[in-house]
Image (cartoon, rainbow, N blue to C red):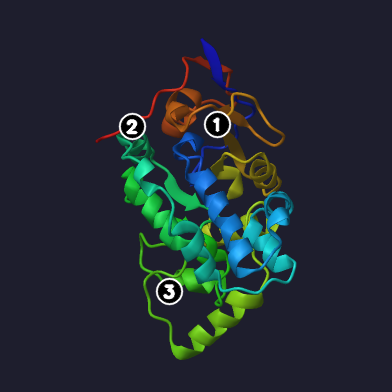
Amino acid sequence: MKMDAIGSAYGAKNDCLFFDMDDTLYPLSTGVNLACRKNIEEFMLQYLNIEESEVPRMCLELYTEYGTTMAGLKALGYEFDNDEFHAYVHGRLPYETLKPDPVLRNLLLSMPQRKIIFTNADKAHTRQVLKRLGLEDCFEGIICFETLNSPLEPADFMDALDDNQVLAGGDQEPNTADRTDASRISSKSPILCKPSLEAFEAAIRIANVDPEKTIFFDDSARNIASGKAAGLYTVIVGSSVLVPGADYALRSIHNIKEAIPEIWDGGEEQMEEVIQPAAVETVVLA
């Protein structure tokens, strides 16, 4: 027996669940993360003319300091089109390693709360991953790169969308003025993303949730700390050890029902330590 989740104080019944996506809804072992980092390094080398010997160190340092390497590059003054960056970095990922996950799908569909993806990734990548996992209809909406870095005010931008849409650009065709604004923002504006507290505050506002009744799932210790600072209940995924700011530690997203039964039944004011078997293997459909 292994301790795969540890609970601390649990307050009012939750109304909403925020889920990170990459390395949270699927395991790191798929190789998508590694391929993404390789593509970022190639972009830095080929399009930004950064010295090859400096690229790996710089990529890691910018990710560590700014939350994403892209945000760090923009902060240093590098100018490039956001869409072109995302197309290069995500356009050659091994998406075929992601398989439908009916176990997770059934868990998500059984949860009575609102469920929203909160990711630093762009809209196209997010939709591709969710489709590959068979989870594209399990979430009310998606807060992604375009949501937080829109030329329009985030709240106004979201209000213009239909239900069950990405909480970002939707599929609407912008007018000429919008394209001009988007191009300007795309090349020069700083990037808003996790783990910045401002990104969490924006997500909470856009989704119109009460942070004290919202649980946030993420594989990043830095994001967990920021989520806690924003007032969210927090779950570190992929670890059996609590990190600073985490209310729960969850080895696998598949163990969520055993670890946090309060999501389904309302639970108690205080959650006891949950002892459970090793993480369930991901079930895939060939």
Image coordinates for residue 273, horizontal then vertical, percent = 58, 18
Mark 3 neighbour class, 10 Å CA radius: few under 14, some 14 to 19, many 20 or more: few
Which SS class for mark 2? Answer: helix
Most foreground residue, 130 or 231: 130
Earlier in the chain: of badge 3 and badge 2, it is 2
Q: Secondary structure at mark 3?
A: loop
**Residue at the image point whose x is 37% and y is 29% from the top:** 282
Residue denoted by label 1: 238
- Distance of label 1 from label 2 (alpha carbons): 17 Å
Measure the alpha-carbon separation of dots 3 and 2: 34 Å
Would you name the residue on which mark 2 appears? 103
Q: Is residue 277 above or below residue 269?
A: above
Q: Which residue is mark 3?
A: 160
Which numbered tag is attached to residue 85? none
Q: Amino acid at mark 3?
A: Ala
| Location of the C terminus (image quadrant) | top left
